[in-house]
Image (cartoon, helix red, strand yellow):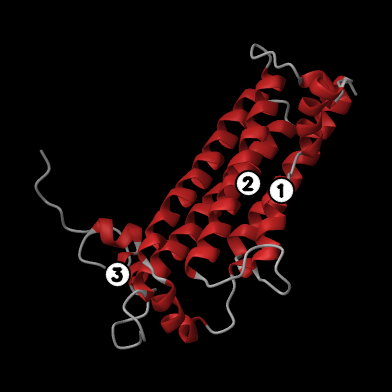
Amino acid sequence: MKHDHSPVLPGQGATDYARYMRIDALLGLQRSPDEVIHRDELLFQVVHQSTELWLKLAAAELAEATAQVAAGRLAAAEAFLVRATLAVRLITDQLEMLRYLSPVDFQAMQPALGNGSGAESPGWRDVQGASRKLGRAFDEQLTTRGIAATALCPTDLSDPLHRLAEAMVEWDERVSVWRVRHYQVALRIGGHRPAGSPGSAANMLAKLAGHRFFPELWQARTSLTTNE
């Protein structure tokens, strides 16, 4: 049994765990007690900074899924897409932390945020771009195989192509759920007027909740009930 735990990795930190995880840098990314104008800035930053990390991972998993689709390895692509979807589920769940931030407290810390907006998230932009690339790679597979998107519904779970299509629908749905939850948080603590109110910042959030990266897969479902 190894008893010597002296660090062997380069970098800062008293242990290899601290050095590999870059703990000093990570925990120094939040505003210090001397900088904050409201104590809940720590809560707000931790939620959003961790969201950026999960989105970074989701974008990487989407990129790998796209590469696997392009190579015709659809089962592998599905596995990576499932991982990306779980990342979005986790960032949706952690929005629950913001339930403990009241509208009054949020307004008090608003000056610290400047003109910042969640719409400026680099992680979200990367996820959007990666999702579009995945959609194009999937469309190319359909074209190569001579299969229409409408043929993917009803689903044949024994077929990797069908299973991947279902995973893509799940991805779309989970992103939509995250957007809806974000919209509700904006109403609850952000002081935004509900969607439909003139000039409300919530209008865009509500509009995005209905966006789909893979509309043809949803249309395939619709055709079952509309006889299109």
Label 1 SS: loop
Q: Closer to the observer: label 3 or label 2?
A: 2
Compute the Cα span from label 1 to label 2.
7 Å
Disc on the earlier residue, 3 or 1:
3
Asked if 203 appears above or below 159 in the picture, the reply is: below
On screen, residue 101 versus residue 155, left or right, reads left
Which one is in front, 4 or 90?
A: 90
Q: Closer to the observer: label 3 or label 1?
A: 1
Disc on the earlier residue, 3 or 2:
3
Marks 1 and 2 close (CB-CB < 8 Å): yes
Residue pointed to by mark 1: 210
Residues packed near mark 3 inside 10 Å, few (<14), some (14 to 19) or many (20 plus): some
- The image quadrant of residue 8 is bottom left
Position in image of residue 100 (x %, y %): 35, 64
Amino acid type of disc 1? Answer: Gly
Disc on the earlier residue, 1 or 2:
2
- The image quadrant of residue 155 is top right
Residue pointed to by mark 2: 176
Amino acid type of disc 3? Answer: Gln
Q: Count of labels shown?
A: 3
Residue displayed at 84% across by 33% down: 140
Which one is in front, 223 or 53?
A: 223
Marks 3 and 2 close (CB-CB < 8 Å): no
The numbered mark at residue 12 is: 3
Amino acid type of disc 2? Answer: Ser
Asked if 39 appears above or below 12 in the picture, the reply is: below
Q: Quadrant of the N terminus?
A: top left
Residue displayed at 34% across by 58% down: 21
Position in image of residue 156 (x %, y %): 69, 13
Label 3 SS: loop
Position in image of residue 193 (x %, y %): 61, 69
